[in-house]
């Protein structure tokens, strides 16, 4: 059972959450208490950082000191709005409206 020293409250629903680092190095909020319905395996590494991985068909069992966790985004009744995605190719607009140019002679 994990300790409560890194538990904080969600800004939207005031539930107890923990911030974890995924296998890809991104931050993810997980519910603070173990959940048997969760799809994440969470563990605290040697530096005290909470790490999570997804339980997949290949690795569907908990290993070592892992506990089963639920992503908070799946249970939060008032999630944060996601920012609008920007174009991956900024500045790629035509400077002249299409079809309005003519060759000058």
Image (cartoon, grey):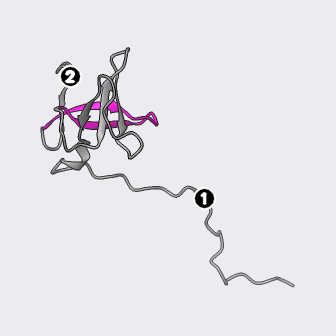
Q: Quadrant of the N terminus?
A: top left
Tell me the quadrant of the picture where the C terminus can be found: bottom right
Provide the residue designation for mark 1: 91
Percent of width and height locating residue 34: 18, 33
Query: Observer-nearest residue: 51 or 64?
Result: 64
Between 3 and 29, the one nearer to me in the picture? 3
Q: Does the magenta stretch include residue 12?
A: no
Q: Which mark is residue 10?
A: none
- Left or right of 64, for residue 23: right
Residue at horizontal 33 percent and vertical 52 percent from the top: 82
Ranked by sequence position, the earlier of labels 1 and 2 is 2
User: What crowding class fits label 2: few (fewer than 14 Cα within 10 Å), some (14-19), or many (20 or more)?
Assistant: some
Image point (76%, 84%), residue name: 102
> What element does badge 2 sit on?
loop
What residue sits right under mark 2 in the picture? 2
| Magenta-colored span | 15-32
| Residue 24, position as x, y percentages in the image | 46, 37
- What whole-number distance in Å separates the C-alpha atoms at marks 1 and 2? 49 Å
Decide whether residue 20 is among the magenta residues: yes
Say few, some or many: other residues with alpha carbon within 10 Å of mark 1 (under 14 / 14 to 19 / 20 or more): few
């Amino acid at each position: 059972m994990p300790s409560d020293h890194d538990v904080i409250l969600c800004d939207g629903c005031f539930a107890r959450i923990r911030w974890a680092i995924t296998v890809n190095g991104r931050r993810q909020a997980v519910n603070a208490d173990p959940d048997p319905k969760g799809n994440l395996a969470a563990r605290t590494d040697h530096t005290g950082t909470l790490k999570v991985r997804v339980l997949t068909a290949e690795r569907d069992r908990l290993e070592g000191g892992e506990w089963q966790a639920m992503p908070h985004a799946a249970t939060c009744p008032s999630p944060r709005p996601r920012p609008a995605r920007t174009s991956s190719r900024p500045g790629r607009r035509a400077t002249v409206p299409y079809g309005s140019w003519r060759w000058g002679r």
